Amino acid sequence: IPGNRCRTSLRMSISDLVGARNL
């Protein structure tokens, strides 16, 4: 499902952002 895929991508992006902030 495109919507689910987009949502997952956004979630991964946020996770990366949080990780970078933590570092």
Image: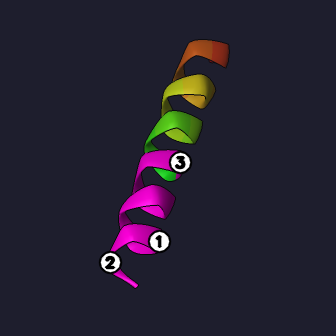
- Mark 3 neighbour class, 10 Å CA radius: few under 14, some 14 to 19, many 20 or more: few
Quarter of the figure with the C terminus: top right
The label nearer to you, 3 versus 1, is: 1
Cα separation, mark 2 vs mark 1, equals 5 Å
In the rendered structure, which amino acid carries the disc numbered 3? Arg
Q: Quadrant of residue 19?
A: top right
Q: Are circles 2 and 1 on residues that touch, CB within 8 Å?
A: yes
Circle on res. 4 = 1
The label nearer to you, 3 versus 2, is: 2
Residue at the image position 46 percent from the left and 58 percent from the top: 7
In the rendered structure, which amino acid carries the disc numbered 1? Asn
Q: Position of residue 13 (x, y in %)?
A: 43, 43
* Residue 10 falls within the magenta-colored stretch: yes
| Residue that label 3 marks | 11
- Mark 2 neighbour class, 10 Å CA radius: few under 14, some 14 to 19, many 20 or more: few
| Label 1 SS | helix
| Residue that label 2 marks | 2
10 shown above or below 17:
below
Decide which of tag 3 and tag 2 comes sooner along the chain.
2
| Label 2 SS | helix
Answer left or right for 8 relative to 6. right
Residue at the image position 51 percent from the left and 35 percent from the top: 14
In the rendered structure, which amino acid carries the disc numbered 2? Pro
Magenta region: 1-11
Decide which of tag 3 and tag 1 comes sooner along the chain.
1
